[in-house]
Image (cartoon, helix red, strand yellow):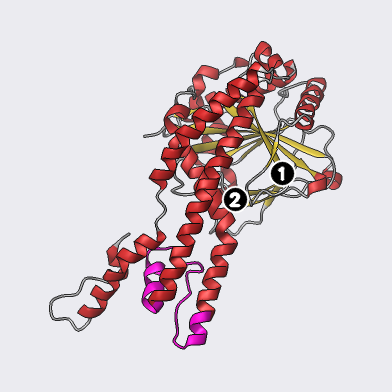
Amino acid sequence: PDVAKMGAEPTAGCRADWRWFRERAFLRPCLAATNVDEVALRQIVPRIMNDQDDEMKRQMRRGVPQQEALQAACVQIKEQVGRYCSAALLQRDTAMLRFAEQGGDDAFRALQAIGVLHPPWLKWEGGSKRRKDALRMFSACLEETRVNRDYELTSRVVRVATAKQYDSTRPPPEALALPEVNHVISAADAQRLRYGKGFEGVLVIDPQPAFLTPDQMRSAFETLERRIVNGGTKVSGNPCNVGAHHGFLPANPSDEEGKKQGLCPATCLLLRRMSALPALIAKHAGWPRPLAVPALMQLGYYPAQTGAQYQVHLDRQPNEVGNKREITFLIYVNTGWDLSVNGGSLRLFPDVDGTDDPIDVTPASGRLVVFRSGDQRHAVLPCTHGKRLALTLWVEYLAD
């Protein structure tokens, strides 16, 4: 933290000398109270990964498909790391409350100065009752936000700890290019994606010809529906995405590889064609930093019976550690979708400073939506009937 935030260093003889040094003295215990040792947490991850790798191999020897065993292992890794992160976060919150209770106004000002006070406007105003009220509000806010902070901490620890192994699995977009999708994204589209401001930087495309024929799309939908029924997705642990289910699919499977994982040829074809789209962006727009295609894409399932939705969010937050998402590609696999009956629109929001109204995009079968992951705020409205299925490919940037 910048000590200057605690007040500028006084000149010799200044009457405020005592105040600056008193505030600076509070930094050390303040930092100790707010610290979470993420390095120590990351060191736990390799051991958990090795245990889950052994378990995954045992599952595969029993006949469990590789992709299913891999997904189960990924879920277990995150759950086990999450338990350590939850304990560390609870310990940190307890230390912060103790620091605030013992340090009074100086402690609250120190917490505010380094940006960890929740809510940030809290301060002592004298009197024992006001002190108790402020501390009670601080404690309640920490409790209410802990689920979100726990999720963020766990995701960050896992991403950073596995970055080297993960990077080795990501080919450049050019390696997955297919001429049969060259018509989907034009040079003008790619330039708009890169340079467009606000909604101008979002592509909503109904390809002609489509990615799949209607019969092929129905076959893909049925295959993915069976996968969901057979446990191929898990309930989302994201507190902003309650009620939704997510699973992972190979980004570039051959028909033979897909067959081993219960995927029909039409599904494999859709996955391959979707993975080929980033090459068009790299070709036409000359993206400012190198791109890479991850080995997996996400299957998102929003059932009407759970009221599943996704609150407004960015796919990559500013300065988010370990999140390399650069461009988001969405393809909807729904068939016969009627917005007035089914709901489930993708809602796009303007820039924070923008004045435009939100735009709703119907998740029509075969529709493609593309936007910059770190710029476009969006949400998924509740699905009111049926099953909303979408494939998401997050094209990532290569680490500097």
User: Does 371 sit above or below residue 138?
Assistant: above
- Residue 212 is left or right of residue 305, and the answer is left
Q: CA distance from mark 2 to mark 1?
A: 15 Å
Q: What residue is at 70 percent from the left and 34 percent from the top?
A: 233
Q: Is residue 193 magenta?
A: no
Q: Amino acid at mark 1?
A: Ala
Left or right: where 348 falls relative to 81? right
Q: Quadrant of the N terminus?
A: bottom left
Which quadrant: the C terminus?
top left
Q: Where is residue 323 drawn, in percent x and y?
A: 48, 40
Where is residue 169 shown, x and y percent of the image?
Answer: 49, 23
Write the start and end of the magenta stretch as one range.
104-132
The outermost residue toward the bottom is 127
Rendered residue at 39%/78% (across/down): 105
> Is residue 185 in view from this perspective?
no
Judged from the image, the secondary structure of the residue bearing numbered disc 1 is loop
Does the residue at mark 2 contact the one at mark 1 (Cβ under 8 Å)?
Answer: no
Query: Would you name the residue on which mark 2 appears?
Result: 313
Name the residue located 15 percent from the left edge and 75 percent from the top edge: 11
Q: Say what amino acid the circle numbered 2 marks.
A: His
Q: Is residue 343 above or below residue 273?
A: below
Extreme residue in the left direction = 12
Residue 123 image position (x, y, % from top left) = 45, 77
